[in-house]
Image (tube, coloured by chain):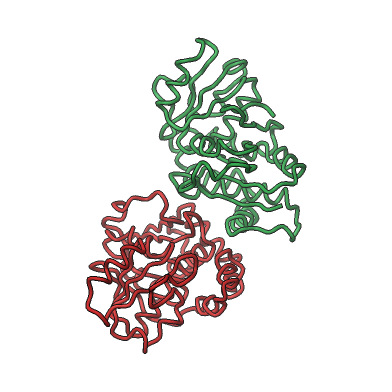
Chain colours: A red, B green
Amino acid sequence: MNINVIISPCGLEELYFINKTVVVIDVLRASNTIINALQNGAKEIIPVAAVEFAVKVSGGMFGGQTLLGGERNTKKIEGFALGNSPLEYTDSVVEGKTIVFYTTNGTPAIVKAKFSEYLIICSFANISAVAKILIKKKKDFEILCAGRNNTLSLEDIICTGYLIDEITNGKKNIPLTDSAKASLTLYKTIGKNIKKFLSETDHGKLLINNGFDEDVVFCSQVNSSEVVPVFSNNSLKLS
Amino acid sequence: MNINVIISPCGLEELYFINKTVVVIDVLRASNTIINALQNGAKEIIPVAAVEFAVKVSGGMFGGQTLLGGERNTKKIEGFALGNSPLEYTDSVVEGKTIVFYTTNGTPAIVKAKFSEYLIICSFANISAVAKILIKKKKDFEILCAGRNNTLSLEDIICTGYLIDEITNGKKNIPLTDSAKASLTLYKTIGKNIKKFLSETDHGKLLINNGFDEDVVFCSQVNSSEVVPVFSNNSLKLS
């Protein structure tokens, strides 16, 4: 089993993902919003790579069953029903609904990987459930970090390291690329206290400054869910 | 003093660098080749972002005083006088010469940062000399890692961490971004034995497989030079 880590989708072609098993990680906050929405009964999430496309896609759907969700610069987008705070996606709001979803880094990363053979969403919340699936598959896979503005996001890298640690479980014979090695090392050194480090990341600090303290705490929960969102026919559903 | 680390030039605009102080790091091997060429008496290095451009630039120069150097896929380019092995750039070869230089990741990174107010080249070889200059300047600066194929290169990140460690010298009040924090942590954990980790990186292994073992050893030398190449008027010269 080979594990490759992509620290940001920047510079990658969509066709790179053909035939690949891919895990997308966007800890703050898209992964957690998607997991929580499906946990709370949403029918599906349709990730889109542009706000304009979100409006277009939702316009063609039956009224009442579709919600627009997402953020730009951490804030809810004008005219959208929901932002990118996982806490907004309660069962009374999302049950049975299709959510067309746009975020700055997370949904473009998912859309870029749309040609993957198998594509799932991971965060600390479902890390053991994701690890179990990958161990069972016994196939090479890629971890695609959404990153931030084309660069590294410490929370995605550390979540990646945690996932690799769960999967390799101390085995030394699994070959690790530079970025996999970096992720594992960062998890083991500065990533053990998730709530603390998350609030000290660039993105964590920005969210806290914008009043999203509770989101940062929510996103630091580990193994609070068994939900593993799977991408198929352009939407994310329960596995 | 704020320190920002860019782990790969992917997705950045040239104009981003206007008014900035920038350190470019490409440990394997462009930084070391440039440092060694200037150390051994080369007049200047002209970094270019495309092979075709290298040929064009050198064509307009006086014969005999200009050499073409660089690599594609680690190997010397057909028709070029020199590859990207720092060991080739001896005094008898480069003294008094202008070298037009192309490499896969290093020179495109330098060219992308060409609008910087002040741009210098760093590797383990000149790390203390670079640190001294930046400490004296007392200005915010950016460390631009050349990276590899739009992603993280462990050797560039660890060299970055080493440079930050030299400059901050344990001071806690210097704010670090996510990528600066990651670099410093990786240097302190897996980066202390430079010769060993360098031979185990993705790029180090590739070079060794292609017969460039000696280059990897050469590039692991720390503070073997006082040369700090400075970019000005499209070429790199001694500071």
Q: Nearer the viewer, residue A96 or A193?
A: A96
Q: Is residue A239 visible?
A: no
Q: Is residue B86 above or below residue A78?
A: above
Q: Position of residue A196 (x, y in %)?
A: 61, 73
Horizontal relation, residue B14 to residue B52: left or right: right
Horizontal relation, residue A180 to residue A238: left or right: right
The residue positioned 40% from the left and 58% from the top of the image is A3
Q: Nearer the viewer, residue B199 or A15?
A: A15
Q: Residue furthest front?
A: A79
The residue positioned 48% from the left and 43% from the top of the image is B203
Q: Position of residue B199 (x, y in %)?
A: 53, 43
Q: Is residue B236 above or below residue A3?
A: above
Callout count:
0
Horizontal relation, residue B30 to residue A53: left or right: right
Q: Is residue A66 above or below residue B177?
A: below
The residue positioned 63% from the left and 38% from the top of the image is B117
